[in-house]
Image (spheres, helix red, strand yellow):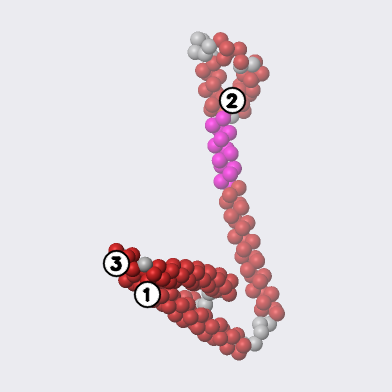
Amino acid sequence: MAAAALPPLPSVRAKELESRASALSRRHASTDYDDTNIDANDQNAQSDQTEAVEKPYSSLYEKNIQSNIEASTLAAEQQHRERLEQIEMLHQKEQKVFDQLPPLDPTVTCDAIHQYLSTTSQFLNSYIADANASLEGTSHKLSVLEKQMSLLESKLESIPGLFSEDEEQSVNATDQDNIIDNVAEG
């Protein structure tokens, strides 16, 4: 059996059926609302002949809308019924296939689960190793950048008159010693 011919998982089917049922109920609610409005409009048109004379096409337009809504609702209901029948046929086919097969041997099941777990853990381990290597490379690049920035800052501080007096006083002697130590380590 081809992979495309496999039926969707039960959870997917349930969600699909729920969404279609809710959409259908919304359609029915909207058509019921439209029907009551159309009936009220028809009663108003019969009771007041002047409105019918002023708007001769309104009732035709409303009837046309009502027939379009009914046709689309009937088509949607028909599609829904056909889809439910298809799903029921798929379910029956699945039951026939799986009822004919004997249960799997427990050792086969254990082997399949073991294989799945081992391949998954191997993948995760290799992924973590790659991520760690990338993180270490980025960390190294950041440390080199910090050392270069420290060196640049110390060179800029050695230029007289570049900074104002307030900025020069804010730099402590301990900070300068730390900058020189970082450069010496690099």
- The type of residue carrying mark 3 is Val
Q: Earlier in the sequence, mark 2 or mark 3?
A: 3
86 vs 166, left or right, is left
50 vs 9, left or right, is left
- The type of residue carrying mark 2 is Val
Circle on res. 53:
3
Q: Residue at x 39, y 69 (%)?
A: 47
Q: Residue at x 48, y 71 (%)?
A: 32
User: Which of the two marks, 3 or 1, is nearer to us in this view?
Assistant: 3
- Pointer 1: what residue? 67
Magenta segment: does it hold 176?
no
- The type of residue carrying mark 1 is Ser
Q: Secondary structure at mark 3?
A: helix
Q: CA distance from mark 3 to mark 1?
A: 23 Å
Magenta residues, start to end: 133-146
176 vs 83, left or right, is right
Circle on res. 183:
2
Residue nearer the viewer, 121 or 164: 164
What kind of secondary structure does the magenta stretch mostly adopt?
A: helix
Report x, y in % for residue 2. 48, 79
Screen quadrant of the C terminus: top right
Label 3 close to label 1 by CB (< 8 Å): no
